[in-house]
């Protein structure tokens, strides 16, 4: 064990934690995808959008910080995946661009496209955001088609080190059933969380009841897709690597990871239990159920991502050239940069503290119909 | 695809330029208007007068409309380093990623958390907490500018890193050198103060429109007063920091300075071109019999003074920079572009040997050669010295537009402060101010054109040319995304302007409150 080894693990933990928080905060997207399902009247739709409208920037910032932290700690992923899976990432970004303007523009006069267009934008972001992010993350387990050759830098005619081997540039990830299953699971999870969030923050009993009833459907489908994906995942073959960096396939790699890292397995278990408890309590109408399922989903995603990168696992396997697979060891920043960034990471608790303060300040009182006037 | 298609480089650049320029329509207004509205809210808290609250709220409304567009266009930029400049992301990601991550952790969260309080918290938190949230929103935005400008300054003047041949990338060895680079400090100060100028111009422009219409006159006069003081200080600081930026580029990017000045043949006691017209169609990378200026007005020796702080200091022109051979102040003689390219190729070949050879002795020799020639590494990717010359007319005219407008803004703010009583009665003057408000954006965009076009062909000055920085994509994909962004951003911009115009037409709710 040495410094770089520890720091690579620490940063993989932080990136995973940011990813997990992102999935949790995408309840905002879940809410957007349900505007018309839950909001049967204009007043209800406005209340729903007011609730998520106070939070969307937090989700957005988490996405941006997730990108920045990934870049700073594992730059080879940034350059390989973003430059290669061009279309998937571009589509994800585009649907977030639409979101960023829509909350502000939808209710303004002279907004050119009309209120409903912006709401359609929000809906699109709500559906495509989680679906595509989930699908893209699916590739952490199923792999992607790329080659990394650092020697290319010495070829002035073609010095680019990362090459994508599929002309669809990332869209092919959506053709892999496991990825799609994960995408759908994330999508449904965000909707489930949104229902629970609304249940907690709406003063209107009728709207709360609609949200509660909706939980059945979202919860059932979420469990169906997620458990199927989990089955695949536990039995799938992953890539491991030796101390010298050699990458090789390992049967049941992720199951082994859980057995080798009981702490992570525990986190996964607690996470699943909390999500289920949140769902059940939500169905029973408990207004704080969001605070069970939300942290639960953070723990589940955290554990899954830790399994992707820890325990000598290649977190971004290449299916066309095993040795190009990205691991936290071969794709990380230098020891110096990781150390520097580690000092910066000590700010995170402080950031979390003021976010918590702001969250409480705004959510202290439930949202009432006259607030949307 | 075995060789990089040059149109891929062009389209990747075009896309980055497009998204960056769109982003820069909104960011300076956020930075400038943000401070002004925070000052107004401070006045409200200190005086307790409803008038200032309504004034602050009105500018906040416009701030919010603009802010949304800044966020929307900004996310693309961050990820574009990966999607379109993937080689860059690996080659210098070890240094460049850190400011981006810190920007997220330290600045963006502050901005996005407190902006929610600023908009939704009027009746939910106390006056003091609300004011603090407004200031923290704008401090967060300004801090984020700090970190992204650290990243940009590092590309203009790379410091604090070392090349590691085992990982084939540059690695950070001195964080303080990167984060507190003097170029970053100057860049930050110039960018932020110039954004304050833009914010002040916006407030003055909108307020003059009300005066012209005879509406909300108390509000307009009060806003003009605050914005003019703020704008005047900002414009003077902008001129000062702009001067320092000029000195920075003289020291670290002499080719940019030569392009901005249209200086082909350098020498001692060089004059500064105050204004002039370049002869169209001249090749700036080769000698010519033609005069390069149709006409020019020069301030004698001023360029030498700016660059070296001596009236008879030596300033190299484009030709001198390509041909080398002139002495450096620090000692030694500058290499020609051809020699640098040769050394760059030697460095690249040595890296290849180092990576592939199994013979330890041979590896050691290769490593020594690489280190001895690494300062010219990036030149090894260039095909001809002519590539080292940026677009001179674009840089030259942009520079002049920016500086001249800087003078105009100083005169305008000072004039309004001194003679406001009269000016506010002259309809033609008010109309002129309204019509010239967009010039603040022109100046600001022109500034970035100088900074970014002037440093071509480098993604990172002297270290990595664009051609070696890109992602391996087909041109068609980049063209498609270029037009998607162009269409989408234009549509959203039109919507934003329309919403903004409507909000301005509606006006503030100050009329029932005493000024
Ligand atoms: C008043 C005299 C001014 C001078 C002498 C001046 C000088 C400069 C110089 C030399 C640069 C290039 C810096 C580099 O490449 O690193 C620059 C960039 C820039 N300027 Fe100015 N400028 C002036 C006024 C303005 C005004 C009025 C604005 C906008 C309202 C402005 C906005 C910018 C921006 C946004 C940049 C790009 C960022 C940067 O490189 O700092 N400048 N300016």
Image (cartoon, coloured by chain):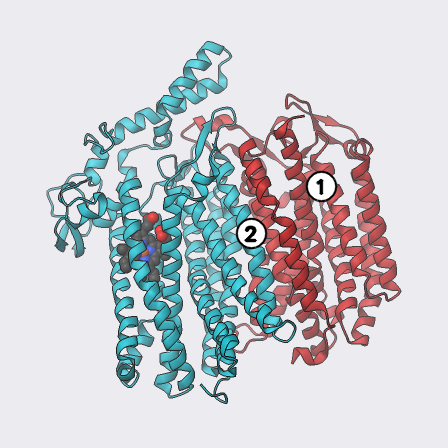
Q: Quadrant of residue B197?
A: bottom left
In front: mark 2 or mark 1? 2
What residue is pinned by disc 1?
A305
**Is residue B173 rendered to the left or right of residue A105?**
left
- Residue B106 — which label? 2
Q: Position of residue B350 (x, y in %)?
A: 41, 20
Q: Residue at x 58, y 67 (%)?
A: A102
Q: Reply above or below: B74 against B391.
A: below
Regarding ligand 1, which quadrant of the image does it lie in? bottom left
Q: Which chain is red?
A: A
Pick the residue in front: A316 or B103: B103
Q: Position of residue B66 (x, y in %)?
A: 49, 67
Q: Position of residue B91 (x, y in %)?
A: 47, 34
Q: Is mark 1 within 8 Å of ligand 1?
A: no
Q: Chain ID for label 2?
A: B
Q: Quadrant of residue B110?
A: bottom right
Q: Residue at x 75, y 69 (%)?
A: A201
Q: Chain ID for label 1?
A: A
Q: Quadrant of residue A58?
A: bottom right
Q: Reply above or below: A147 against A36.
A: above
> The residue tagged with tag 2: helix, strand or loop?
helix
């Amino acid at each position: 064990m040495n410094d770089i080894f520890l720091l690579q693990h620490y940063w993989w933990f932080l990136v995973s934690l940011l990813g997990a928080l992102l999935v949790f905060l995408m309840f905002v997207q879940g809410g957007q995808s349900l505007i018309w399902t839950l909001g049967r009247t204009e007043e209800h739709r406005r209340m729903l959008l007011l609730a998520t409208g106070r939070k969307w920037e937090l989700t957005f910032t988490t996405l941006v910080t997730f990108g920045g932290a990934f870049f700073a700690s594992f730059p080879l992923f940034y350059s390989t995946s973003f430059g290669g899976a061009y279309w998937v990432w571009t589509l994800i970004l585009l649907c977030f661009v639409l979101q960023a303007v829509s909350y502000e523009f939808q209710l303004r006069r002279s907004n050119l496209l009309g209120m409903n267009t912006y709401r359609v934008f929000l809906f699109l972001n709500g559906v495509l955001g989680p679906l595509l992010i989930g699908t893209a993350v699916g590739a952490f387990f199923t792999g992607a088609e790329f080659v990394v050759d650092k020697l290319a830098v010495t070829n002035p005619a073609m010095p680019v080190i990362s090459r994508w081997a599929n002309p669809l540039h990332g869209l092919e990830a959506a053709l892999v059933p496991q990825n799609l299953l994960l995408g759908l699971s994330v999508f449904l999870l965000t909707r489930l969380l949104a229902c629970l969030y609304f249940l907690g923050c709406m003063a209107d009993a009728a709207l709360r009841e609609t949200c509660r009833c909706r939980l059945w459907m979202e919860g059932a489908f979420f469990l169906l897709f997620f458990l199927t994906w989990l089955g695949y995942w536990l039995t799938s073959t992953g890539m491991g690597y030796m101390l010298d960096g050699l990458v090789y396939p390992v049967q049941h790699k992720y199951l082994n990871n859980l057995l080798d890292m009981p702490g992570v397995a525990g986190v996964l278990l607690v996470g699943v239990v909390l999500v289920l408890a949140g769902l059940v309590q939500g169905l029973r109408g408990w207004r704080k159920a969001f605070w069970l399922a939300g942290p639960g989903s953070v723990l589940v995603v955290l554990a899954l991502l830790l399994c992707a990168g820890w325990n000598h696992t290649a977190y971004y396997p290449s299916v066309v050239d095993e040795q190009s697979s990205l691991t936290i060891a071969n794709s990380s920043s230098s020891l110096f940069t990781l150390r520097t960034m580690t000092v910066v990471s000590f700010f995170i608790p402080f950031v979390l503290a003021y976010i918590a303060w702001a969250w409480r300040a705004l959510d202290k009182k439930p949202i009432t119909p006259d607030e949307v006037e | 695809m075995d060789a990089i298609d040059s149109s891929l480089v062009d389209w990747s650049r075009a896309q980055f330029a497009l998204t960056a320029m769109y982003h820069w329509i909104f960011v300076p207004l956020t930075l400038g208007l943000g401070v002004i509205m925070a000052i107004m809210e401070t006045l409200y808290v200190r005086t307790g007068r409803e008038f200032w609250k309504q004034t602050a709220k009105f500018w906040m409304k416009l701030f919010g409309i603009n802010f949304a567009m800044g966020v929307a266009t900004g996310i693309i930029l961050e990820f574009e380093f990966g999607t379109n400049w993937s080689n860059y992301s690996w080659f210098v990601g070890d240094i460049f990623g850190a400011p981006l991550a810190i920007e997220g952790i330290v600045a963006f969260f502050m901005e996005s958390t407190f902006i929610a309080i600023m908009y939704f918290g009027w009746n939910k938190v106390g006056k003091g907490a609300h004011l603090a949230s407004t200031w923290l929103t704008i401090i967060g935005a300004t801090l984020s500018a700090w970190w992204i400008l650290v990243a940009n300054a590092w590309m203009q003047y790379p410091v604090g890193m070392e090349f590691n041949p085992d990982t084939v990338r540059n690695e950070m060895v001195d964080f303080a050198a990167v984060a507190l680079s003097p170029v970053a400090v100057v860049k930050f100060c110039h960018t932020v103060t110039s954004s304050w100028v833009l914010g002040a111009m916006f407030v003055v422009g909108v307020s003059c429109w009300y005066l012209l219409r005879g509406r909300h006159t108390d509000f307009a006069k009060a806003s003009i007063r605050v914005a003019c003081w703020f704008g005047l200080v900002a414009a003077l600081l902008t001129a000062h920091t702009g001067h320092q930026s000029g000195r920075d580029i003289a020291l670290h990017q002499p080719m940019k300075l030569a392009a901005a000045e249209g200086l082909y043949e350098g020498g001692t006691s060089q004059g500064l071109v105050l204004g002039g017209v370049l002869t169209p169609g001249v090749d700036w990378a080769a000698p010519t019999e033609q005069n390069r200026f149709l006409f020019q007005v020069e301030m004698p020796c001023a360029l030498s003074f700016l660059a070296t702080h001596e009236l008879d200091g030596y300033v190299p022109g484009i030709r001198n920079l390509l041909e080398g051979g002139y002495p450096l102040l620090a000692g030694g003689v500058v290499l020609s572009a051809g020699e640098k390219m040769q050394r760059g190729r030697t460095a690249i070949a040595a890296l290849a040997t180092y990576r592939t050879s199994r013979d330890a002795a041979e590896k050691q020799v290769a490593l020594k050669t690489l280190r001895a020639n690494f300062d010219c590494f990036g030149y090894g990717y260039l095909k001809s010295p002519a590539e080292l010359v940026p677009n001179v007319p674009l840089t030259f005219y942009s520079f002049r537009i920016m500086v001249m407008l800087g003078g105009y803004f100083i005169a305008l703010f000072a004039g309004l402060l001194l003679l406001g009583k009269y000016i506010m009665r002259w309809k033609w003057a008010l109309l002129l101010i309204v019509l010239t408000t967009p010039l603040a954006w022109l100046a600001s965009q022109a500034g970035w054109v100088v900074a970014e076009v002037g440093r071509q062909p480098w993604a990172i000055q002297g270290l990595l040319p664009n051609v070696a920085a890109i992602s391996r994509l087909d041109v068609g994909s980049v063209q498609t995304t270029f037009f998607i962004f162009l269409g989408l951003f234009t549509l959203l911009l039109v919507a934003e302007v329309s919403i903004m115009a409507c909000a301005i037409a509606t006006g503030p709710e100050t009329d029932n409150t005493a000024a």
